[in-house]
Amino acid sequence: MKWGIALAWMLWLAPALAWAQAAADAPAPAPSGKLDRIVKEQIATDAASRASQERINQLDDETQRLLSEYRRALADTESYTIYAKQLAAQVDSQNQEMNAMQQQLVEVETTSREVGPLMERMLETLEQFVALDVPFLLDERRNRVAKLKEMMTRADVTISEKFRRIVEAYQVEMDYGRTIEAYEAKLDDTADARTVQLLRVGRVGLLYQTIDGKETGYWDASAKRWVVDDAYAHSFKEGIAVAKKTRAPEMLRIPVPAPKAAKS
């Protein structure tokens, strides 16, 4: 009986003893000051973590910005390299043009020395030609030659322009040989020369008729003088009508000098 009571008592005390032992083994609660320190340390740790994350974000943004600038710098470098090659090619082309222009300047200087005497000879030939030719429009033609000779001494006229005007004068003289013209002028250069009507048929014939129509004649190229010949009065009037374009061109009867053998 005694042993049964003792066993029951021990079974009843066992849970209480286990609880007491567990309480004894559990750590003692931390003091209030230590807990605050732990909380503050945790808060500081969290703040440091946030600051580190922000720094990481900033570094990432900076890295992206630098990477963009680097890529842009690479693109600019490639663009500048291509542009530099283009400029180098242009400079090389310009240098070649400069060399060519310098060569042309040397050639122009040589040409100028050669063209100058040539133009002088051309003017002398033109002047002699007008003097020896059929005496039509003498004042106009002589003045043209005189102006060309005066132009040759002018420094403000380029060589090309001088040459152009001389060639133009030759062209005018050539055109006289393909046209028919009627005009009034003095028969010769004397002070008492008569004013007459003149009919030029190319360079093969030059006829005149007095204003009253009573006298007709022509220029004798062989004798170098005017010859009175009223037989050409009708032809003269027909030629005047053709020259003034009041009638269609037709065959005209005019005195033509006999051909001569050319001098070798």
Image (spheres, helix red, strand yellow):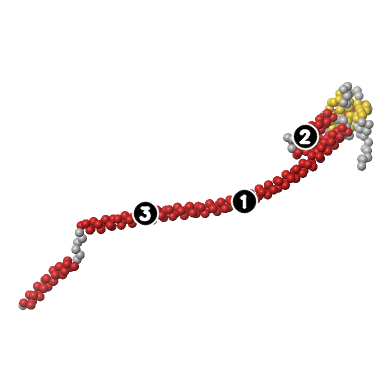
Q: Residue 164: which numbered mark, if any?
A: none
First in sequence: mark 2 vs mark 1: 1
The mark total stands at: 3
Residue sitting at x 19%, y 66%: 26
| Coordinates of residue 13 in the picture (x, y in percent) | 11, 71
First in sequence: mark 1 vs mark 3: 3
Residue at disc 1, secondary structure: helix
Q: Nearer the viewer, mark 2 or mark 3?
A: 2
Residue identified by numbered label 3: 54
How many C-alpha atoms fall within 10 Å of the one at disc 3: few (<14), some, or many (≥20)? few
Residue sitting at x 20%, y 65%: 27
Give the distance between the C-alpha atoms of the residues marked 1 and 3, in whole angstroms: 50 Å
Residue 44 in which image quadrant: bottom left
Q: Nearer the viewer, mark 1 or mark 3?
A: 1
Give the distance between the C-alpha atoms of the residues marked 2 and 1, in whole angstroms: 45 Å
In the foreground, 245 or 53 = 53
Residue identified by numbered label 1: 88
Q: Give left or right: position of 110 versus 233.
A: left
Q: Give left or right: position of 132 versus 68.
A: right
Relative height, residue 33 to residue 116 (above, below): below
First in sequence: mark 2 vs mark 3: 3
Residue sitting at x 34%, y 54%: 51
